[in-house]
Amino acid sequence: MSFTQIELPVKPPRRFLPENLSIDSWKKIKPFYDELKSRPVSTVGDLKNWLMDASEMEAVLQEDAGWRYIRMSCNTADHHLSEAFNFFITQLQPRFAPYEHELHKKLLSSPFLGELPDEYKIFIRHIRREVELFRSENIPLFTELHTEEQKYAALVAEMTVEMEGKEMTLPQAGNYLKDTNRSRREEVYSKIAARRMQDRDKLDELYSALVRIRNKVALNAGFRDYRDYMFSALGRFDYTVQDCINFQDAISEVIVPVIENLEIQRKKTLGLDSLKPWDLEVDVSGKPSLKPFSGVDELMDKTIICFENIDPMLGEYMQIMKAMKHVDLESRKGKAPGGFNYPLYETGVPFVFVNAANSLRDLVTMVHEGGHAVHSLLTREMEIVGFKDTPSEVAELASMSMELISMEHWDVFFSNPDDLKRARRQQLEKVLNVFPWVATIDKFQHWVYTHPEHSAEERTLAWKKIYGEFAGKEVDWTGHQDSFDAAWQKQLHLYQVPFYYIEYGMAQLGAIAVWRNYKENPRKGLENYLNALRLGYTRSIGEIYRTAGIRFDFSKEYVNELTQFVLGEIEKL
């Protein structure tokens, strides 16, 4: 496939730091922190210039750390790469933290703070919260947490199974769960489950250690528990713990029965006496699993065309990612699990990381991360990093909306109309299935961190109870109770980004509403969506959602309204 010639973004020249600054020791960076700390600020113009220089410093350091993390994730087996990342985390970041705290206090004490434009208000609110939370005794704990959290990726990256005489990563082997041969599905499910069980105790011990450290961080900061600490640290100004609990209840009341009905239909269509965990991904049509692409090069090229068909600008954005080699899409042994879009604030072009194994799920992951990338590129020229650093409720709206908007153009991946219908139906069922799992993970975290002294056995019992509330009653786990009991260990977020999960449910609701608007009026729906993303984090979450033409609402009534819309679209297929 050939594409039109595009102009690649150029990293803007630095105005404060030397272009050739090597970030390999604290003594090379300290003078610039000292300069910012001591610099006189005599006018609002001085304050804006000072903020831009501080933002440049943040962007440069963040991007350096970002590349270290990306390279380590692409090859967890290379100890030099993990050492380079750990050097930043253990030797540099602890030195930055107290200086950044002093810079934040200097900003907040400026007599010119109130003269900054309105677009700074959200940023300043965030800085106030960071100053309130800062405790010097937590700096070494954060360093310890960063180090421990990376152990999860290293453990999972080494997990492989053998199928048909080949060693496969778990994502690659997972494709067999779509096989029409039920015995083969059971075989691969059992192998994957057995491989996970080999490291169950290690993952339990790792999580227990993380919970202990996180609880100590919360207590040091004067909070009752880590849940309350994280609601503050994540800047959840727009909703409360009780709102999350109400959302969990709405999912249980509205969506879980819908999923159970879909599973009853699945069991009936497949002609099964009992629905087993290896029967949940096979196509009920009895046809082979969908293959939307062949190899990661084709995945990238088809994504470019798909985005271009939505809007030429979006296609150009994906071409930029490809041309700058800011993608790693292949699943392979030694590569960290999952997928992410890593913003690189100095360059302004993010990095997309996916573990693709030629499945529909990989296509969805690609367009999801592509939505994040679009968000990064739309905000790349904003004045300071703080304007670009969006909360996850907004970031995930960008990505999950792109999953559904792009679905209207998936003919690029599926030339056969029947395959296209199958793909859309599977995606819409997945959209609904997101909610119970999100509620499960969120409720589980609420329990974990409000019971910080729990044992591994107590945690398993709590998980079984919570998972049972949202998993429905149709799936028969007989013979695989261990997989049920340890299913939470598959969720990377629990280990690496605690409490970052309920946002997927909130954003999924928003994405359905964005897609509904797009279907009614593609031009206006897309325009509203992109205008919302262009705001970065210069407005509240509610204002950003309103700009997108939707509501920031996760009430039972709204959950039901959008669930019924999705069910109606499934019926049309």
Image: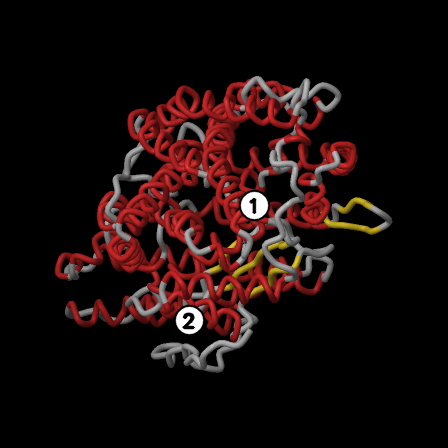
* Nearer-the-camera pick, 309 or 440: 309
| Relative to 62, 191 lies left or right | right
Q: Residues within 10 Å of mark 1 (few under 14, many from 20)?
A: some
* Nearer-the-camera pick, 415 or 35: 415
Q: Are marks 1 and 2 in contact (CB under 8 Å)?
A: no
Above/below status of 260 relative to 138: above
Quadrant including the N terminus: bottom right
Q: Residue furthest left?
A: 115
- Badge 1 element: helix
Above/below status of 66 relative to 477: below
| Relative to 185, 99 lies left or right | left
Q: Which residue is mark 1?
A: 145
Q: Which residue is mark 2?
A: 316
* Nearer-the-camera pick, 490 or 130: 490
Q: CA gap, disc 1 to disc 2?
A: 38 Å
Quarter of the image for residue 234 reads top left
Above/below status of 484 relative to 386: above
Q: Residues within 10 Å of mark 2 (few under 14, many from 20)?
A: many
Count of numbered tags? 2
